[in-house]
């Protein structure tokens, strides 16, 4: 399979248009059409379907895009490692961060990375831990920070940070929060929490079930930003790390109080795939992450 054809196909799917992809790649539309036909002949299946607005990938096409991104990423890693053998940190690093971590680390991580490795590029993806883990396995990421991952033979996990979960409320609902909230009383609060896909939700339900606490879950919202917007408007209460509130930009009416007796503790780990050797630039980036955590970037004080 020609890697240029694969790269072109991925770009077509991303744009949903042969015309726009051709303009971006600076090639003719007819050339892209021939490349797609050649891929379809090699794979023995249709990859694209036309609609009124352009083209969309078939099921087989979407699968090729997922695998193709990983393949192209590994080619980039190989080039990067060859450059490092010559004593130059070059190429592109792809790292994933959960939203609450990204809000506190991304800017400092990018600035420090650019300063120390001017010949290299960094790409940061922010998403739920479950999505980041999937992208790691597909080869779209080199490393990621994850909350509470399950045992996975395909991943190396290294614990880097422990956080307590807080009950988050707003002054707008007319209900004052105490200085701390016993876990046994969480059922009194109408909750807005992430869906069961979210590792924090799994942790909350496991700990409350252990102590026989029934939760009043009113809404399931996976977006941390939207969840906190709803909490701020008095729709309900959230249960997240304190960092989720600290990462919120601008003035807000949110208050976070610790959950006690017992605390609910979430673990943040660095994850890298066992199936691929860790590149030198990935190792250097994770050193930067360790530095930022050691400096208290994930636990800034008000």
Image (cartoon, helix red, strand yellow):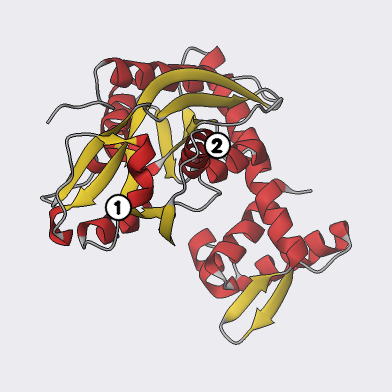
Residue toward you, 196 or 9: 196
Residue toward you, 60 or 215: 215
- Does residue 4 appear in this view? no
- Does residue 204 appear in this view? yes
Judging by the rendered image, the residue that carries numbered circle 1 is 237
Q: Earlier in the sequence, mark 1 or mark 2?
A: 2
Query: Which of label 1 and label 2 is nearer to you?
Result: 1
Residue 296 falls left or right of residue 37: left
Q: Is disc 2 surrounded by few (<14), some (14 to 19) or many (20+) residues within 10 Å?
A: many
Q: How many marks?
A: 2
Q: Position of residue 207 (x, y in %)?
A: 49, 34
Q: Is disc 1 surrounded by few (<14), some (14 to 19) or many (20+) residues within 10 Å?
A: many
Q: Secondary structure at mark 1?
A: loop
At 56% from the left edge and 83% from the top edge, which residue is drawn? 53
Q: Position of residue 165 (x, y in %)?
A: 35, 34
Q: Position of residue 191 (x, y in %)?
A: 36, 54
Distance Cα–Cα, label 1 vs label 2: 33 Å
Q: Which mark is residue 141?
A: 2
Residue 26 falls left or right of residue 225: right
- Residue 182, compared with residue 218, is above or below; it is above
The image quadrant that residue 61 belongs to is bottom right
Residue 257 falls left or right of residue 117: left
At 22% from the left edge and 46% from the top edge, which residue is drawn? 248
Residue toward you, 246 or 138: 246
Q: Secondary structure at mark 2?
A: loop
Q: Position of residue 240 (x, y in %)?
A: 35, 41
Do residues under tags 1 and 2 come within 8 Å of each other at their CB atoms? no
- Residue 4, compared with residue 208, is above or below; it is below
Residue 131 falls left or right of residue 42: left
Q: Quadrant of the C terminus?
A: top left
At 48% from the left edge and 18% from the top edge, which residue is drawn? 159
């Amino acid at each position: 399979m020609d890697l240029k054809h694969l790269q072109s196909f991925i770009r077509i799917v991303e744009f949903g248009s042969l015309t726009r992809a051709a303009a971006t790649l600076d090639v003719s539309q007819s050339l892209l059409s021939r490349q797609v036909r050649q891929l379809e002949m090699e794979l023995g299946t249709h990859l694209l379907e036309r609609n009124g607005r352009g083209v969309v990938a078939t099921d087989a096409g979407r699968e090729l895009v997922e695998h193709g991104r990983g393949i192209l990423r590994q080619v980039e890693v190989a080039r990067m490692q060859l450059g490092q053998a010559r004593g130059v940190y070059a190429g592109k690093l792809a790292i994933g961060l959960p939203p609450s971590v990204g809000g506190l680390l991304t800017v400092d991580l990018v600035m420090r990375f650019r300063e120390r490795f001017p010949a290299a590029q960094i790409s940061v993806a922010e998403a739920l831990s479950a999505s980041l883990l999937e992208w790691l396995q597909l080869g779209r990421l080199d490393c990621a920070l994850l909350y509470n991952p399950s045992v996975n033979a395909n991943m190396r996990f290294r614990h880097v940070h422990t956080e307590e979960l807080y009950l988050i409320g707003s002054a707008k609902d007319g209900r004052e929060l105490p200085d701390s909230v016993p876990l046994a009383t969480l059922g009194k609060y109408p909750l807005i929490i992430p869906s069961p896909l979210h590792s924090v939700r799994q942790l909350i339900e496991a700990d409350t079930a252990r102590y026989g606490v029934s939760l009043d879950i009113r809404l399931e919202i996976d977006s941390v930003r939207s969840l906190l917007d709803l909490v701020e408007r008095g729709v309900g209460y959230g249960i997240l790390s304190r960092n989720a509130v600290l990462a919120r930009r601008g003035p807000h009416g949110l208050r976070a109080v610790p959950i006690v007796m017992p605390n609910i503790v979430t673990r943040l780990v660095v994850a890298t795939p066992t199936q691929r050797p860790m590149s030198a630039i990935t190792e250097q980036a994770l050193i930067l992450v360790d530095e930022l955590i050691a400096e208290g970037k994930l636990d800034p004080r008000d």
